[in-house]
Each structure stands twice: as structure tokens, then as C-alpha cells.
Amino acid sequence: MKILTRPQMRIAEIGKELKILNVTGTKGVEMPCHFSTKEAIIIVLKGEVLIKLEDKEIYLKPNQSLIIPASEPHTLSVKEDFAANVIMAIDSEIKFINN
């Protein structure tokens, strides 16, 4: 049995300019340092997540959101089983650093 160590992402919808990703994860999983090539919005639907940016740490709980600037390196740590939507431009890509 494989143990998941990163949040799971899947495309939920694609429009003319934007896409929505569903992101889910269980307590303890982490997404290593990465960035989006364009601005992204994360909206937490359930659980709790810690996002570490270069100069701050932000805890997000249900109904809270955060705009992550383009090319801003950050990590994501799941503190309580969570689900979120991430909204970004169709041509935006998630790139991992040192992976």
C-alpha cells in the first residue's frame, strides 16, 4: 500500500481564461517548495493548512482564502484533513523547486 506524502490535485473545471483545481490532503502531508507561474487563489473548504511564504506563515481554515503572487516560492503543510479550491489562469503552471 502506497502512503501519500503530498496533497492530491485534480482539475475540476476549465473556463476560457481560468481553471479550478481541487486539492485534498490528510493531516501530515506536505507540498514541498513550489510556485505558480501566475497569481493563484487558494480557498479552503475544510480542514486547516499552513502556507509558508518567504517572509511569513499563514494558517488557513474553512472559508478563508489567500492570493499567492506569481513566482512566490511557498510550501503547504496539512494540519487537519483538508480540501481546497485553487483558482489560476489556464496557462499557469505549478513548478517545484529542487525536485
Image (spheres, rainbow, N blue to C red):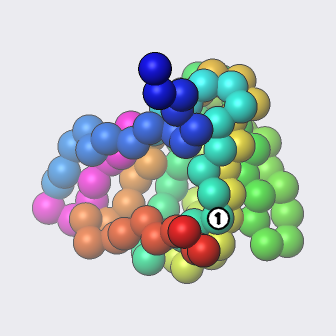
- Image quadrant where residue 60 sits: top right
- In the image, 22: left or right of 47? left
Estimate the x, y position of residue 24 in percent, counting from the top left. 49, 31
Front position in the image: 17 or 70: 70
- In the image, 28: left or right of 2? right
- Magenta residues, start to end: 16-22
Front position in the image: 95 or 70: 95
Estimate the x, y position of residue 79 in percent, counting from the top left. 75, 31
Q: Does the stretch in magenta take in 67? A: no
- Image quadrant where residue 99 sits: bottom right
Q: Is mark 1 on a helix, strand or loop?
A: strand
- In the image, 97: left or right of 15? right
Name the residue located 44 percent from the left edge and 38 percent from the top edge: 8
Q: How crowded is mark 1: few (under 14 residues within 10 Å), some or many (20 or more)?
A: some
Q: Main secondary structure of the magenta part?
A: strand
Name the residue located 43 percent from the left edge and 66 percent from the top edge: 94
